[in-house]
Image (cartoon, rainbow, N blue to C red):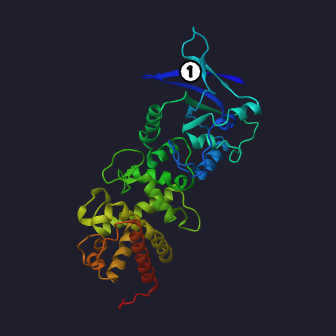
Amino acid sequence: MREMYLLEVIQHDVKSYVGFFPARELVKLATKAELQEPQEAQRPINQKRLEEISDFVADKGILSTSIVIGTKDDRLSVKPVSDKIPYLYKIEFPESENEFDDYKDSFDIMDGQHRLFSFLPEYIKISDSVPFDIPFVVYIKPTLKERRIIFKNTNEKQESVASNLLMWFREKLNMLSGKEKTYHSVVSSLSCEARSPLKGRIIMGAEKITGGFKAQQVITILDKADIKDVDKKPLDNDQMFKLITNYLLGWEKAVGSKFCDRDKAFGAFSKISGFRFMISMLPEFYNQAKTDKRKIDCSYVVEKLEELFATYGMVASDLFVKDSQYMTKLGSNPFSAETPTTLLAKEWINNLKALKGGEFDPLA
């Protein structure tokens, strides 16, 4: 057997002990739950989550938070090291294969099952030569009442971190990847640059902005429209900022309202749904500017919008004002959810294409 030292922790009258042990070996002692099966004090085991953690660890990832375990019987017990050293205890863990067999199912995992089970032989991806200890908090034969308290603390009292705030942390730690890495910088510029019509409207972290757009939402919308690759060669951050800014300023002028004003008379124009609609149309505006050999500045966007909506006997604001003839004819609010907004954008993208191609049908 192998002796390991633990520190005693007392909260009210409940004692627990903090220590660490090689993850590959500690997992051999845990009561193994079946995948996707309901459990008394944990969510069902998710195989995808196990694989994600295993990949994270294999990529130099560190599991800094402790798992919480509760012993099931007397096989695992703690003893004080010395009367002269308070709070220092020792526990004996198995060392040989025979001992591990004797100590199977000696504790339940009350929190952190995915972290620990990712070290099962069928999931672990790091080499046997790589040391990996995992910290734990152990309760010795916890009562039902204590288990209930622990469950409440680890499951009901934990508030998940908002995804937008997590992205803020990833940016500070230089951990952005994928679409976040592609668009975070330009979204940050749109949030703070004086010329941007969205200055002060984008929530970059957890700040409170009435009617604000979450940075993660804006990034997703820009990514779906593929703004980075709107041309044959990828645009850099300055080019994307200039393009988006000029484009949105053109919409402001054509509609007769500003995003920062949040004018209720113009409905979804200054909301995230209106932003989604306009950005969805941006690639076609870019294509037509190239064909026209025109710079995509505010004047060009206004000119193109006026031409487009005049073709249909409208002005740009008719698209957003809820009691306009156009909106009344639609019979429902197309900006009520992402899907109808996307469908509306596709319709107007086709209208814009038809305008350029001279394919407008006056009887449509």
Task: Indicate the quadrant where residue 263 lies.
Answer: bottom left
Residue 310: x %, y % from top left: 32, 80
Mark yes or no: residue 193 visible: no
User: Residue at point 51% right, 47% down?
Assistant: 43
Disc 1 target residue: 7
The number of discs equals 1
Between 194 and 131, the one nearer to me in the picture = 131
Is residue 328 shown left or right of residue 214? left
Residue 249: x %, y % from top left: 36, 63
Is residue 73 shown left or right of residue 268? right
Quadrant in which the N terminus appears: top right
Pointer 1 local density, CA inside 10 Å: few below 14, some 14–19, many at least 20: some
Q: Is residue 31 above or below residue 236?
A: above
Quadrant in which the C terminus appears: bottom left
User: Residue at point 46% right, 49% down?
Assistant: 163
Mark yes or no: residue 186 visible: yes
Between 78 and 84, the one nearer to me in the picture = 78
Residue 321: x %, y % from top left: 26, 70
Is residue 176 shown left or right of residue 276? right
Toward the bottom, the furthest residue is: 363
Helix, strand or loop for disc 1: strand
User: Residue at point 66% right, 40% down?
Assistant: 60
Q: Is residue 4 above or below residue 167?
A: above
User: Residue at point 26% right, 66% down?
Assistant: 266
Toward the front, the furthest residue is: 73
Residue 162: x %, y % from top left: 43, 47
Task: Indicate the quadrant where residue 316 lies.
Answer: bottom left
Tag 1: residue type? Leu
Q: Is residue 283 above or below residue 311?
A: above
